[in-house]
Amino acid sequence: MAHPYIPNAGPETRAAMLAEIGAPDVAEFYRDIPAELRLDRPLDLPAPYTDEPGLVRHMHGLLARNTHPAELLSFLGHGCYHHHVPAVCDEVNGRGEFLTAYAGEPYEDHGRFQALFEYVSMMAELLEMDVVNVPVYDGYQATGTALRMAARRTGRSRVLVSGAIAADKLAKIRDYLTPDVEVRLAPVADSGEMGEVRLDDTFAALYLETPTVHGVVETRGRELAELAHGVGALLVVGTDPISLGVLAPPASYGADLVCGDIQSLGMHPQYGGGQAGFIASHDDERLVAEFPSRLFGIAPTAVPGEYGFGDVFYDRTSFALREEGKEWVGTAAALWGITAGVYLALMGPQGMREIGETVLARTRYAMRALASAGAVVRHQEAVHFREFAVQVPDADALLADLHGRGILGGVRLGDREVLVCVTERHSIADIDTLAAAVKDALSALGGAE
């Protein structure tokens, strides 16, 4: 049966399309997805609501099951962070001309191109890079794309990735690079930084993340850049831009590509939304040509003193090349680029520095407080930004106890390991409250081992 709104769903049309591309059936498109992840039955959907009041009641019931981080004392992080969001960020990204914009071109644009140009300009200044893309879906995709860019640029098909990254992120990298690029994993040293690095001229890139999954700030950036460049590989660095008010930008120690997520720049924690990925490089045409996503620039117009904003080097993108594109990206995250631009404009260099200094100080205070409470803090001698891991007798029991006290104590990394996140939103009193609760909980559990 044909779908009433999708004419290509008709049996004859579908058969013709399959014949054109040489696929026996639609299932052929999903063969790369492991069988155990596929649903081999129809979706178990409830009966549809035919009246608007009923649907509204249903949605309110679902939303009422959510708990906003501000309703509890939250120390959750691990890729989605509860930083302060200035009201102006929500005000601007809620405007109709931005909120509803999708792929409007200059003749129907209402400032979106200029807003995105301002965003990439401020990001480039923060990163000390020349070129920054319009955001891709999230930081995970940005990392996968940056590594693919390195592989295309060098003509090589292996990358070495730091083991000090989130398991979910590593899974996404492997998924995004398979089967063309082989992913090798570097060990993690006792310090929490990247361990021994072994590279040769078959590697396209060395991927370093700082801060690491445990919040450790890497200190060997220049050394690792020299190792990568010594074999003709690129150094790709993943980072969070909110840390760059106090930490050196990766470009300063030799990074060729920098990538990450901008969720910390004015976006609330959400269930899958609020994430957007950035990729940045120097003004090297051979590398810029490998960006699959849109790049915005500025140019003078026919009217003296007036400027226009629009795509740069557009013919390299999948939007222009379609199925011949080097890689495909979508447009889902451009709104968050505008939001991040508002945030960066509001904070300015001094504001970013103050936030960074506050986070560094609160993180160290929290590490000491939890150590005094009886938790074993991992990599305690290293510099940490925003996050740190603690070892406890029973992670599930500790987090359940804290939740009963109105505290989201962190993210479970293992049976005995919890990742704790501290941002500028946390006061000293908040951290003291967490430490006291952890001390009581550990006492009930028999103490840390």
Image (cartoon, rainbow, N blue to C red):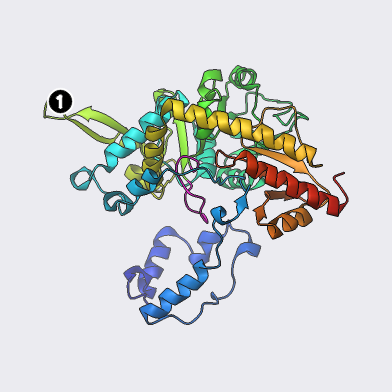
The answer to whether residue 377 is seen in the rendering is no
Tell me what residue is drawn at x 62 percent, y 40 percent: 422
- Check disc 1 and give the amino acid type: Gly
Vertical arrangement, residue 402 with respect to residue 365, above or below: below
Q: Nearer the viewer, residue 292 or 76?
A: 76
Q: In the rendered structure, which segment of residues is drawn in magenta?
A: 263-275
| Magenta part, dominant SS | loop
Q: Nearer the viewer, residue 429 or 40?
A: 429
Quadrant (top left/top right/bottom left/bottom right) for the C terminus: top right
Residue 284: name its quadrant. Answer: top left
Q: Is residue 239 left or right of residue 405?
A: left
The answer to whether residue 67 is seen in the rendering is yes
Total numbered circles = 1
Residue 269 lies in the magenta-colored region: yes
Residue at mark 1: 305
Tell me what residue is drawn at x 45 percent, y 44 percent: 85
Q: Nearer the viewer, residue 447 or 63?
A: 447
Residue 48: name its quadrant. Answer: bottom left
Tell me what residue is drawn at x 55 percent, y 77 percent: 44
Quadrant (top left/top right/bottom left/bottom right) for the N terminus: bottom left
**Residue 399 image position (x, y, % from top left):** 73, 54
**Residue 50 image position (x, y, % from top left):** 38, 82
**Residue 73 image position (x, y, % from top left):** 62, 51
Q: Nearer the viewer, residue 245 or 206?
A: 245
Q: Is residue 262 left or right of residue 89?
A: right
Residue 124: name its quadrant. Answer: top left
Mark 1 falls on what kind of element? loop
Crowdedness of circle 1 by 10 Å Cα count: few (<14), some, many (20+)? few
Vertical arrangement, residue 285 with respect to residue 411, above or below: above
Q: Is residue 144 left or right of residue 377?
A: left
